[in-house]
Amino acid sequence: MKWWKCQWSHRFESYRLCFLKNDGLQNLFMYCILMKANSLEHKKINIALIGNCQTLSLHVYLHDLLKNKNYEIKWIRFGKHVLPGYLKIISHIYPDLISITDDEEGIEYIKTCDYVIYQPILIKTSCNFNATKIKSYCSNTCTQISFISIYIDGDFNMGVYRLKQRELERGTTIKVTDILEKHKDKKLLLRKNHPTTFLFLKLLEQICIHLNIDFFKNTDKYLITDNYTRLGLPPDF
């Protein structure tokens, strides 16, 4: 049969050999199994990021980490009022990034996702993308990864304490405060809510654990600028 000439993945070679030895309905049954397995192997892994400018910036790093691999990564805006200027700047600097600005499109994409990375948004802030709604859109097989929006105004220790209280209240997956306390001798913030590249990379490192993927082997290229941030990320307003 001509379709026997199809090129199979090495992973299924043993199954293919078994398949060739069978006849009749067994042939058809084995063929269906192989086709299904082959399609699953090539299925893109969908990842969504939802939150403020911090998640949009993480989108850049995650895109760099997973480019040319079998991943689809999209940032979802949780309201029309959110980051219009920042989104325009990021889209100009990084045209390959995919952002969703339509609520319905964002909801439908979340339903297809294997991983959803988000900041727990309050109901009063977003009726469609608050934490409860996001969880309701996720499939049973979707892994949800949450972290608190980073904001420290004034005293560092008091700021970390307040963030820790919010982490406890909202039950975040990743404890940003652990990173802040562990690396408090480093430059972590450019402004009260603008992390440095160093902090972004430490956060991404934790996200990679939950994604079950390898982190960057070398991060030197990200840490060469004087202001500890990659050019234009975040921009100096």
Image (cartoon, rainbow, N blue to C red):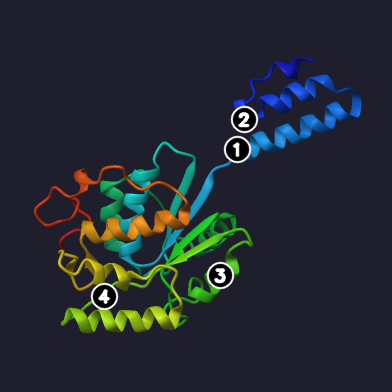
Q: Amino acid at mark 2?
A: Arg
Q: Are marks 3 and 2 in contact (CB under 8 Å)?
A: no
Image-based side of 40 in relation to 189, left or right: right
Relative image position of residue 180 (x, y in whole percent): 25, 70
Judging from the image, what secondary structure is the residue with disc 1 in?
helix
Q: Amino acid at mark 3?
A: Lys
Disc with the residue nearer the chain's start (3 vs 2) = 2
On screen, residue 64 above or below 153: above
Disc 2: which residue:
11
Disc with the residue nearer the chain's start (1 vs 2) = 2
Q: CA distance from mark 4 to mark 1?
A: 40 Å
Disc with the residue nearer the chain's start (3 vs 4) = 3
Residue at 78% from the left image edge and 24% from the top image edge: 18
Q: CA distance from mark 1 to mark 2?
A: 10 Å
Disc 3: which residue:
135
- Residue 151 shows which numbered tag? 4
Disc 1: which residue:
41
- Residue 160 shows which numbered tag? none
Is residue 3 or residue 219 the one in the foreground?
219
Residue at 58% from the left image edge and 41% from the top image edge: 43
Residue at 90% from the left image edge and 29% from the top image edge: 25
Q: CA distance from mark 3 to mark 4?
A: 24 Å
Judging from the image, what secondary structure is the residue with disc 4 in?
loop
In front of the other: label 1 or label 3?
1
Relative image position of residue 186 (x, y in whole percent): 16, 64
- Which quarter of the figure has residue 228? bottom left
